[in-house]
Amino acid sequence: MLKRIPILVGFAVLLLPSSSHAEFPAPPAGANAWLYETAERVTFGVDDGVFLREAASPLMGFTLIGTPLCPSAMLANVPGLAHCTVSGVGRSRLDAQTGNGSTSGTFDVVINMPSNSSVHVPNVPVISGTFRGAVTSVPGLPLLSLAGRFQIGTVDAQTFPELASLVGTSVSFTGTFRIPVGPTETSGLCPAACYVIDGSLVPVQNAELSTGFALVRLEIQFCAIEQDRDIEPEPDNVQ
């Protein structure tokens, strides 16, 4: 078994400097974190008479400083930061007719290792864990609502000793999946790509495109950090 060895980065730790050369999407209003499905693999099947849509997606996005997944303590000596970077993998198991079901996955709050270039994607985990939740469709709108919980399993306590107390805690959250629409779905009212927000069409930012495709955006609001408790196993069938 390989032993995980924390990488000491010292003053070279850079999560997301404001002077970065990359263009990052602006934070959605009211969101503590926002992630994007950078790709998706979907399969369909039938289980106990339920027609299922099962999907897996790599996730990439950001969370604000001072939120449960981006504690201010880890950034106190790093000036000019706007966000922490989060990556992960999400899986969903939805009733294909109702759009309701479950989701689960893993996440990492990541930083740049010193040998990375200034525009390299951050790739060294500082906080890692799992998440699980329930997905509910919003009738008539390209939206899904989400409620669930993050569990923090490991931290790089050697590099960031102040994070050690996070191990064994969890964070409840609510969220919204915004599915982009275009001219076909909006009768030309959105000429390129838009999200539906409060009944209005809001253009997708250039930084929310990947190889020309508009990305599904997940907006998250955190609750308070709590002591961990066991999550019930994900049900085999979607109700």
Image (cartoon, rainbow, N blue to C red):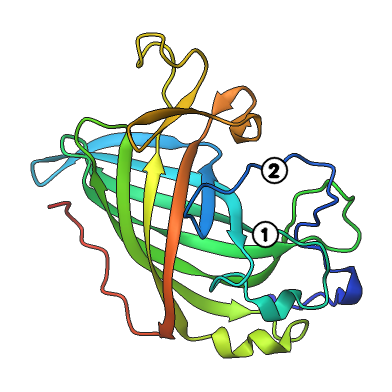
Q: Where residue 11 sits in the image (x, y, percent)?
A: 90, 74
Q: In the drawing, what numbered circle is on residue 63?
A: none
Q: Vertically, is 141 above or below 72? A: above
Mark 2 or 1 closer to N-term? Answer: 2
Q: Position of residue 56 (x, y in %)?
A: 43, 45
> Gap between marks 2 and 1, in whole Å?
10 Å
Contact between marks 2 and 1 (CB within 8 A): the answer is yes
Q: Is residue 59 visible?
A: yes
Relative to 112, say whether 210 is above or below: above
Q: Which residue is mark 1?
A: 83
Q: Residues within 10 Å of mark 1 (few under 14, many from 20)?
A: many
Residue depicted at x 55% and y 84%: 166
The mark found on residue 24 in the picture is 2
Q: Position of residue 147 (x, y in %)?
A: 31, 60
Q: 169 or 203: nearer the eye? A: 203
| Element carrying mark 2 | loop
The disc labelled 2 sits on which kind of residue? Phe
Residue 230 percent across, percent down from the top left: 32, 82
Q: Residues within 10 Å of mark 2 (few under 14, many from 20)?
A: some
**Amino acid found under the numbered disc labelled 1:** His
Q: Is residue 3 visible?
A: no
Residue 85, image quadrant:
bottom right
